[in-house]
Amino acid sequence: MTFRIRAAAVILLYISIAGAAFAQARGADVYKAKCARCHDDNGLAATPMARSTGAKSFKSAELMKWSDDQFFAYTKKTYRTNAPTDAQIKDVVAYIRKLQK
């Protein structure tokens, strides 16, 4: 019985790690397609488009404090054309967290 519990715990741990990594990979693809034009590949928003739209660096003190829910809500509210789906936004938020490190 103990072996089964340990095996189940290891499997659940693996799934949770793999799931997070997979979400970040999907998030990177969506980010590159829909976000990088303004926020740049590294999230620093050092592009001409960022200057014209007022996009902020994801490494700014303000955005470093934002919760995942704040990123999600802001993206839903401000995205005007070719908006990502809710699932894509969640994946992008996971990727943004990686960029912030």
Image (cartoon, grey):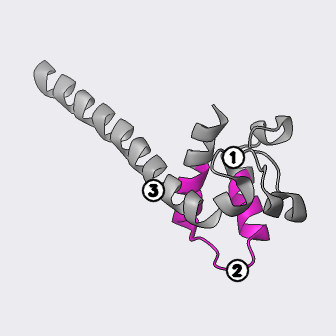
x, y percent for residue 82: 64, 79
What residue sits right under mark 2 in the picture? Answer: 81
Q: What residue is disc 1 on?
A: 43
Alpha-carbon distance for marks 3 and 1?
16 Å
Q: Identity of the amino acid at label 3?
A: Arg
For label 2, the SS is loop
> How dense is the environment of label 1, judged by Cα within 10 Å: few (below 14), some, or many (20 and up)?
many
Q: Which amino acid type is shown beneath numbered disc 1?
A: Gly
Query: SS at mark 3?
Result: helix
**41 and 14: which is toward the camera:** 41
Between circles 2 and 1, the one closer to the viewer is 1
Query: Does 68 sit above or below residue 52?
Result: above
Quarter location, residue 65: top right
Q: Quadrant of the N terminus?
A: top left
Nearer-the-camera pick, 50 or 48: 48
Classify 2 as above or below 71: above
> Which numbered circle lies on residue 26?
3
Q: Position of residue 91 (x, y in %)?
A: 53, 55
Q: On the rendered image, what quadrant is the C terminus found in?
A: top right
Q: Earlier in the sequence, mark 3 or mark 1?
A: 3
- CA–CA distance between discs 2 and 1? 20 Å
User: At 69% from the left edge and 46% from the top edge, which residue is drawn?
Assistant: 43
- Which segment is the magenta one? 71-93
